[in-house]
Amino acid sequence: MQCGYLVGTLCGILTLLYSMFFFSIDHSWIYFEPINRDKLIVVLLGLIANICVIGHLQQRNKNAMREISKLEAEGKIAAARAQILHNMSHDIRTPINGILGMAHIIESNPADTAKVLENVEKIEKSASALLSLANNVLDMNEMQSGNIQMERIPFRLALLCRETMENSKNLFPDNGLEFSFQVQAACEQELIGSSYHIKKILFNLYTNAIRYTQAGGLVATQITLLRETETQVVLQIKISDTGEGMSQEFIDTLLFEPFTQEKESARTKYQGSGLGMAIVKGLVDRMGGTITAESQLHKGSTFTLELPFEKPKEAAQQKKLASLSGVNILLADDNTLNLEIAEYILTEAGAVVTKAENGKDALELFKNAPENSFDIILMDVMMPEMDGLTATRRIRSLNRPDAERIPIFAVTASIFPGDIEKIKAAGMTAYLPKPLVWEELIAVLERYCEKADCPLQGV
């Protein structure tokens, strides 16, 4: 608009000057004649008209360009949505197709134990891939809606990194890679932070490093202390690999965008959805940290995390049990299969399990049992007769000391902020997201079975 007014003004000034000077036809002579009042009025009107007309044309052109940009943006958004749906369809159908196919092979060869076990293992991998995709989509939705709730619980970062690296290795048992892990002694200290979300960050970085590195390659971890005050520390985590690598252009423009991979063939070859790095960036930003990437094609990549953590006010004193031996657990779940599997796992760990098929049964079993009969309650949230939240409120309201202090864990597939608030309001100690990872469940129960008044947290 301002440019239009400037052009109009210049045209008006040229008109004014031309009206004050007279030229011969061949421009061989020139003379000046003072402008009279009538001519000045005409020239000024022309000046104003030039400014208005050219400015108006400029504004119309600007509006037209804005509309064109809007249409182009809408077209890109529509194309992006179509591509996302295409990718999602592929990433969902592929593992489902594998599960159905392998189930058919098992059904056709029930007597061939080796073949059955081989296909059961493949089914587990396909189901894990499907679950990972579902979790990533939910995480992206939470980030885009601003509903991510960061926890503040004690944990040890170095230990969490080691565990996540080992869990990631187990997903690729025949990877043929070497792993190195270096950590400064100062980084072994207990910290306060959202271990659940840090684990998500690390898991995405480790699985990418392993997935895109060929056999014989190296995945290295280095944890160092950058800064420390009386109340806070800033740690640096470097995860490097000698894998496929990325171009600088991809790092600068698309690396942290959802559903992006540098080569479309990577989606089929490496079975990635392209959501992981967008989730990592969103979580790191939410924690007030930074993440950078350095890479060379066919030589490898290095991701550098810098994350701030609070220092605990006093060292946590937790009694650690060697196992669940002798621990009495009240287990409530309306799904018979889930109940059977959980009972088997917990019993194998040494626990004594009492089963309930709904919240009402769990309430009656607890109420009719002598005081301190149970050490822990695992409560499914969605059950017939009486849901887990109602059963928990009823148990907490009983006039007996153990009802007030017993740890009650919500076992749920719904981990949105609104659901977590309901769990907390009902008086539950913590929530365990489905599907359960049994090794982690045993470790959590060991930590909590003799601990009272602990804060709500996700595990």
Image (cartoon, rainbow, N blue to C red):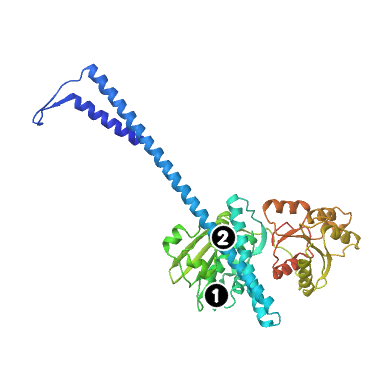
Seen in the picture, residue 319 relative to 414 is either above or below; the reply is: below
Query: Which residue is more in the foreground, 36 or 361?
Result: 361
Label 1: which residue?
180
Instruction: Estimate the spatial distance between the alpha carbons at disc 2 and disc 1, rounded to whole Å.
Output: 34 Å
Task: Tell me, yes or no, if residue 215 can be seen here.
Answer: yes
Q: Secondary structure at mark 2?
A: helix
The residue positioned 66% from the left and 57% from the top of the image is 152
Amino acid tagged 2: Met
Q: Residues within 10 Å of mark 1 (few under 14, many from 20)?
A: few
Q: Nearer the viewer, residue 296 or 53?
A: 53
The quadrant holding residue 248 is: bottom left
Camera-nearest label, 2 or 1:
2
Residue lying farthest front? 108
Q: Give the residue at x 78% y 72%.
A: 344
Q: Position of residue 401 (x, y in %)?
A: 87, 57
- Depth check: give the residue in front, 131 or 158: 131
Q: Which residue matches tag 2?
A: 88
